[in-house]
Image (cartoon, rainbow, N blue to C red):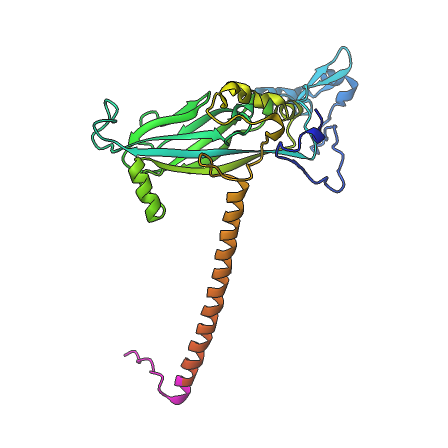
Amino acid sequence: MSEQDLPDTHLHQLPDPAGTSATSAGHSRRSSGRYQPDISSGLAGEEFDAEERGREAAAGDAPRATRGLKLNLHEGRVKTAPQGPKRVKYISVGRAFILGSQAWALDESNKPEGTPADHTKGWKVYVKGIENGPDITTWLKKVQFKLHHTYANNTRTVESPPFEIHETGWGGFQVEIRLFFASEANEKPQWRTHLLQLEPYGSDAEIEAQKAKNLVVSEICEMVDFNEPVEPFYAKLTSEAQWAYMDKGKAKGKNRQGQAWVPKEERTAQLPERSTPTNQFSKETEAAMLDMLRKATDKVFVMIEEEKKAATERAKEIKSLQESGDWPQPARKR
């Protein structure tokens, strides 16, 4: 499958840096004046300074000239460690996902057995893919949640979907979330944080609606970008296999995750064009948010200009009072 066949994989072309410098594969010699072996000759081990080699061995280090290399004295060859998979240059693949939490008030009808008396809320925190998007397990291997230190076993790891944990409590806090990527990714884990929202929030109408449902939902759409992914991971991110879940249960009009079935030609890793009752994250929402920020920024600039004018008028008034002699003089210290 070519890149031209994949217009909807949230794939970006990275700029080609102007001018690339070659990297030397050789090792520089030290400037200590001591003899340094020519490791390319294969005869270095026999002539290497015994005192230097003994001191480095006592320190637990390999001889500096041969670190990271396997020297074969008999065949006269230097063997290097095998290199990892190649990266796809100048390509970035992005994936949107959702960090969220849900909370509800506890009473005798829904309080789990053994819940502490002061725990008035039940809640869950989770990481999930966007609605009708590619399977999140294509790139996400496991998720680690770090809770408030007052919880027993406050660092918990979930290694398969759904990536979520359930608990009870009485107050909100910042949940630290660590994302571990698929083994093919060859990428380090990344951290995110999410504020556990237990109390209803928003406008008066939104607060009343949350109270009526006894459910407080707090979600944010995040993005992870894989810049120049390694070839095996790139193949996975652009494979049709990430949509396999979509075709399971399609006879009933929904897939196994309870989402509406989407034809292959309409599947995309991008945010959908418009929001739905079950998914608020879309390009439409993004545009509305940007417009709100622009209006707020314009309002701030207007307020700054008004304050500048008011400050100028105050300065003129103070100067006028000083010149007329009506300006109070500061009291002298005794």
* Magenta stretch, residue numbers: 321-334
Q: Position of residue 333 (x, y in %)?
A: 30, 78
- The quadrant of the image that shows the C terminus is bottom left
Q: Position of residue 294 (x, y in %)?
A: 52, 55
User: Image point 58% across, 32% down: which residue?
Assistant: 269
Residue at the extreme bottom of the image, as rendered: 324
Q: Position of residue 138 (x, y in %)?
A: 56, 24
User: Image point 78% across, 14% down: which residue?
Assistant: 76
The quadrant in which residue 193 appears is top left
Residue at the extreme front of the image, as rendered: 252
**Most foreground residue, 122 or 76:** 122
User: Image point 45% across, 80% down: which residue?
Assistant: 316
Left or right: where does residue 262 sit relative to residue 122? right
Left or right: where does residue 144 sit relative to residue 270? left
Q: Position of residue 7 (x, y in %)?
A: 66, 33
**Most foreground residue, 277 or 77:** 277
Magenta stretch: includes residue 192: no
Left or right: where does residue 61 sit relative to residue 292? right
Q: Evaluate whether residue 269 shows in this view.
A: yes
- Residue 64, placed above or below residue 273: above
**Most foreground residue, 175 or 43:** 175
